[in-house]
Image (tube, helix red, strand yellow):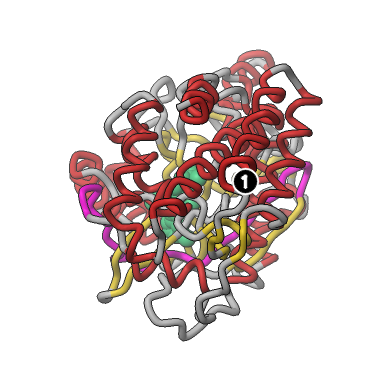
């Protein structure tokens, strides 16, 4: 094989999801990647992956070489997957035990110069070192490149035991999300024995490596099941997330709150960055004018409380994906978000409809959070503004505007204020 053929076969040169993920996971140029062929001279092969189902439609890099890892990569967390995906994975999981998977898909071979230190070159080995473990095997999800998305690795020990879940922050937007999740998981590790608080995977390691920020999170229980998307919101769990075992905080007016100060500062920053920000500044002013005197309880929020970030295991609720979590928001934000996201993501409804779903959900369940009518309006208006600022923050960090939310959400906010 000539050098140019070998180079063109390197999946890192691709513009698709496989290219993006392989650049994130095998970023060091000393690492040689070959598909279907032998590693270059002077290199030794250190890992092999099946590219499932094909190079052009890759969805998954399935680690080969340790049959129990191959099977575990296909079978672990299957209860969280949609039925069709689950069935395909289960069938492949059966095949992997007899070695058929190795023959059914293109094979990606990872090789390093003979004698090179693995933990310097390869992410899975660097993570194994950080966890103080023997070699780990990694299964990588592949999806289309997206500035909002993080490549992820499921890490397994050689005997097929899940060892961790790694999220790779690779640009400014995703590094910020990974940093926020790590910070949230660190403080949540101290929240123990709180009745109704969801089980939360612990942070195992966080590392800054080759321009990436990587968080390794404890594996979810392998038999965790997803929460049905039609389930009603879990109010007791929301309260426990907000209060973390502390008694209800005394009510404080929106005016003068750290929350309003943060929204004001963020809106000001968004106004410096671009013209839409001026509308956010005006909207924050209007929020303060309308609701400044309304007393509310402030607490923590999960920040992305939706059925697909929640599961059940052993009769307990499990919550993951704490990238947007934070302190000091009006109690009820997670309840609002749950309604908003179910509308936008599940039902593909426009944000005006989603905003009405927020009002309806707060009207239906708000009393159980102690929210009277004025407080419910504050929570809905404040939440929608918070969501627009989140959308701006991601855009500002290079992830592009979420076209479902911008500029429609600003229009909705302004209309509510003029109503
Ligand atoms: N600790 C974990 N162990 C195993 N699987 C996980 C873990 N955390 C997340 N996952 C799986 O990966 C999916 C994506 O992770 P998530 O944290 O929700 O990130 P995002 O939705 O921002 O991409 C989850 O829906 C879940 O199926
Ligand atoms: Mg998620």
Q: Quadrant of the C terminus?
A: top left
Is 410 or 109 nearer to us in this picture? 410
Q: Which residue is drawn at the image coordinates 76% and 52% (left, top)?
A: 208
- Would you say residue 140 is visible in this rendering? no
Q: What residue is shown with label 1?
A: 168
Instruction: Using the image as rendered, state which of residue 98 and residue 272 is in the foreground.
Output: 272
Mark 1 and ligand 1: say if the CB distance to the nearest ligand atom is below 8 Å. no
Q: Identify whether 31 is placed above or below 254.
A: above
Instruction: Work out whether 186 lies above or below 125.
Output: below
Residue beneath the point at 57% across and 47% down? 291
State the predominant SS element of the stretch in magenta: loop
Q: Secondary structure at mark 1?
A: strand
x, y percentage for residue 234?
31, 63
Q: Residue 285 location in percent, x, y?
A: 67, 36
| Front in this rendered view, residue 370 or 197 | 370
Give how far across and how far down residue 362 sits, in percent.
Answer: 35, 50
Query: Residue most toward the right?
Result: 272
Task: Please tell me which residue is depicted at 58% across the width and 23% down the height of the picture.
Answer: 401
Question: What are the residue bounds of the magenta stretch?
Answer: 209-231
Between 392 and 18, the one nearer to me in the picture: 392
For the N terminus, the quadrant is: top right
Q: Is residue 369 magenta?
A: no
């Amino acid at each position: 094989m000539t050098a140019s053929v070998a180079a063109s076969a390197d999946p890192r040169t691709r513009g698709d999801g496989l290219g993006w993920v392989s650049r994130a996971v095998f970023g060091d140029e000393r690492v040689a990647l070959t598909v279907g062929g032998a590693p270059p001279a002077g290199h030794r092969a250190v890992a092999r992956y099946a590219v499932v189902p094909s190079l052009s439609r890759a969805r998954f890099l399935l680690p080969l070489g340790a049959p129990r890892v191959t099977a575990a990569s296909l079978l672990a967390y299957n209860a969280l997957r949609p039925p069709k995906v689950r069935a395909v994975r289960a069938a492949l999981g059966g095949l992997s035990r007899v070695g058929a998977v190795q023959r059914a898909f293109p094979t990606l071979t990872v090789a390093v110069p003979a004698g090179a230190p693995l933990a310097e070159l390869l992410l899975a080995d660097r993570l194994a070192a950080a966890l103080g473990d023997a070699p780990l095997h990694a299964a990588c999800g592949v999806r289309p490149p997206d500035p909002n998305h993080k490549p992820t690795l499921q890490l397994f020990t050689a005997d097929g035991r899940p060892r961790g879940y790694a999220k790779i922050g690779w640009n400014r937007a995703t590094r910020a999300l990974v940093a926020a999740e790590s910070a949230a998981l660190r403080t949540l590790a101290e929240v123990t024995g709180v009745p109704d608080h969801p089980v939360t995977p612990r942070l195992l390691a966080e590392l800054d490596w080759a321009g990436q920020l990587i968080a390794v999170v404890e594996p979810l229980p392998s038999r965790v099941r997803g929460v049905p998307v039609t389930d009603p919101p879990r109010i007791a769990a929301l309260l426990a997330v907000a209060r973390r075992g502390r008694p209800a905080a005394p009510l404080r007016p929106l005016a003068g709150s750290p929350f309003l100060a943060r929204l004001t500062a963020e809106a000001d920053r968004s106004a410096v960055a671009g013209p839409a920000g001026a509308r956010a500044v005006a909207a924050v002013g209007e929020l303060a004018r309308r609701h400044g005197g309304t007393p509310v309880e402030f607490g923590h929020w999960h920040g992305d409380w939706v059925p697909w970030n929640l599961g059940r295991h052993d009769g307990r609720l499990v919550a993951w994906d704490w990238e947007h979590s934070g302190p000091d928001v009006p109690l009820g934000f997670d309840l609002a978000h749950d309604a908003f996201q179910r509308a936008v993501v599940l039902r593909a409804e426009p944000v005006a409809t989603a905003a009405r779903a927020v009002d309806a959900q707060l009207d239906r369940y708000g009393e159980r959070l102690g929210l009277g009518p004025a407080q419910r309006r504050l929570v809905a208006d404040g939440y929608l503004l918070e969501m627009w600022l989140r959308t701006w923050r991601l855009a500002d960090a290079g992830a592009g505007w979420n076209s479902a939310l911008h500029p429609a959400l600003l229009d909705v906010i302004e209309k509510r204020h003029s109503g």
